[in-house]
Image (cartoon, coloured by chain):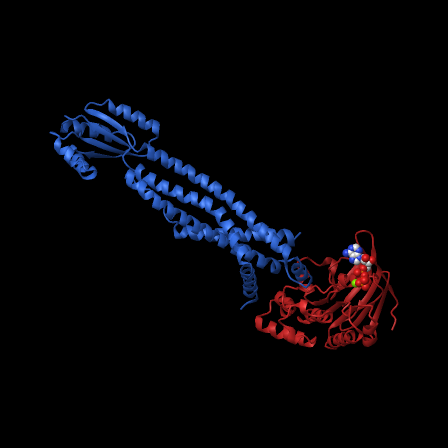
Chain colours: A red, B blue
Amino acid sequence: MIRFEHVDKRYPGGIIALQDVSLRIERGELVVIAGASGAGKSTMLKLIAAVEQPSAGRVSVNDEDLRGLRARALPYLRRQLGLVFQDHKLLFDRSVFDNVALPLAIAGLGRKETSRRVDAALDKVGLLGRSHASPIALSGGEQQRLCIARAIVHRPAILLADEPTGNLDPDHAGAIATLFESFNRAGVTVVIATHDRVVIERLRPRRLDLQAGRLLEAAP
Amino acid sequence: MTGWLRAHARALGAALGRIFRHPAASLLEAIVLGMALALPLGLYVAIDGVHAFASRHASAPELSVYLALGADQRAIDAVRARLEGLDGVDRVDFISRQDAAKALRKSAGLAEALDALPDNPLPDAFAIHGGGWGASRLERLRSEIALWPQVALVQVDAGWARTLEAAAKLGRAVAALLGVMFGLAALAIVFNTVRLQLLDRRDEIELSRLIGATPGFICRPFVYLGALQGLLGGAVALLLVLAASAWLNAALVDFSIAYGAHLSFRAVPWGVAGAILAGAGLLGATAARLAAGRQLWA
Ligand SMILES: Nc1ncnc2c1ncn2[C@@H]1O[C@H](COP(=O)(O)OP(=O)(O)OP(=O)(O)O)[C@@H](O)[C@H]1O
Ligand SMILES: [Mg+2]
């Protein structure tokens, strides 16, 4: 369902982030993209979400070639994805509730259904009591979980998480890994970019190792 | 509720929320917009008043023909026939010297002065209404008729009123031009406010695009914001013009009494007020849409 065919990504300025990457991720898989800082993990996720375009090769999602995707169709592709951003992208002038409700507003859901789903999502990440708080009032780990709630609230088919355990201690990182495992068990395709050993050890996922933009053979 | 309606209600709510969260800034903006729109609107109302005043007076007879004091009925009939035969004459009214005296008695409080005179000093006269004679044609007619037998005096009337009427027409064109200019200024004002709002919200906009918002979804609250600001500005403009014309009308009472001519500024009719509000709202929405478009589809 996610396919890379000989994908290169060169950023303006000449930095080569990915080189000849080919892979397939099937529906319902749990995959971790591992690699050192700067290896190209975030770049891979950005290509899947069509935030960046490949310099060469082809990326397709749900059998749809993203290069041929028209600008009008892009928003609808993105609504099938749940994105956990490396830099969170929380709106600090909105409540926790409003942050999580944004994808539902975009999808055009009504008030009642929105509030029901937001509560369910916040409950899953253990933030139900903090609906009315500002994200500023949350700890780093709580902010991370808030991002996850926002990424799953609209029940995406694919969850793309970029360093979802960024600066968490092993206990909390483990809890979040378990959370992703439960989403995956519910049928969501989960792709996590991380170099966090705790996550990898807890999930025992299919692992894609990136090294300086090249994909190494998968290691168990 | 359909999804479409819900999306619009949500955008309107967001725009209203933004206005109520910054009441001072919104009010200030409405006042600036209102002043920009009040200038051409005020000019229009003033010209409308002058025009109504002028056309009331311009419909008075164009030529008055006074006969010699001793003119008899035959002479009167002869002059009437010649006047009616003139090209472009709509109507010829005869005002007998008795009628003229009666009217003068009534209107100017000259009864005693008239009574003091041995005879009625007023001549018989004709008032001639014609269709759209220009000033030069009128002048030619005047000198031609003055040469007729038994005609003592020919006067061109209400020339000033017609000049004023023509000036008012020109003034209207100037007001329309100013309307366009100040409308563009108002457009620029809203454009800039919305542009700043977009900058203020760029994190939210960026995030929304990343998670699948259409440009329309992102744009809509800003377009509503522009429309609301335009509406508020239009309302302020109407209030300003209403207040100014009420104040001027009070001052004009003295003028009217002094000159026996009723000049006043009429209230902006409901239809025009509605059109001003709708136009201002549309202007705001257009400005916002331009600002958002520039940012979102770049
Ligand atoms: N927008 C950009 N413009 C230019 N270069 C970029 C851009 N984004 C990423 N790069 C470069 O591409 C390379 C890969 O970046 P990427 O963000 O994919 O790494 P990463 O594996 O996610 O690293 P980290 O673990 O630190 O997040 C890096 O060398 C980075 O400097
Ligand atoms: Mg990264």
In the depicted view, which residue is nearer to us: A213 or A63? A213
Q: Position of residue B122 (x, y in %)?
A: 17, 30
The C terminus of chain A, quarter of image: bottom right
Task: Choose top left, top right, bottom left or bottom right for residue B252.
Answer: top left
Q: Is residue B95 visible?
A: yes
In the depicted view, which residue is nearer to us: A47 or B110? B110
- Name the residue located 32 percent from the left edge and 40 percent from the top edge: B255
Task: Choose top left, top right, bottom left or bottom right for residue B75.
Answer: top left
Location of residue B26 with respect to B88 vertically, above or below: below
Q: Position of residue A39 (x, y in %)?
A: 84, 62
Q: Position of residue A212 (x, y in %)?
A: 86, 60
Q: Position of residue B6 (x, y in %)?
A: 55, 66
Location of residue B56 with respect to B148 vertically, above or below: below
In-image side of A19 versus B218 (left or right): right
Tell me how many marks there are: 0
> Residue farthest to the left?
B118
Location of residue B237 with respect to A68 vertically, above or below: above
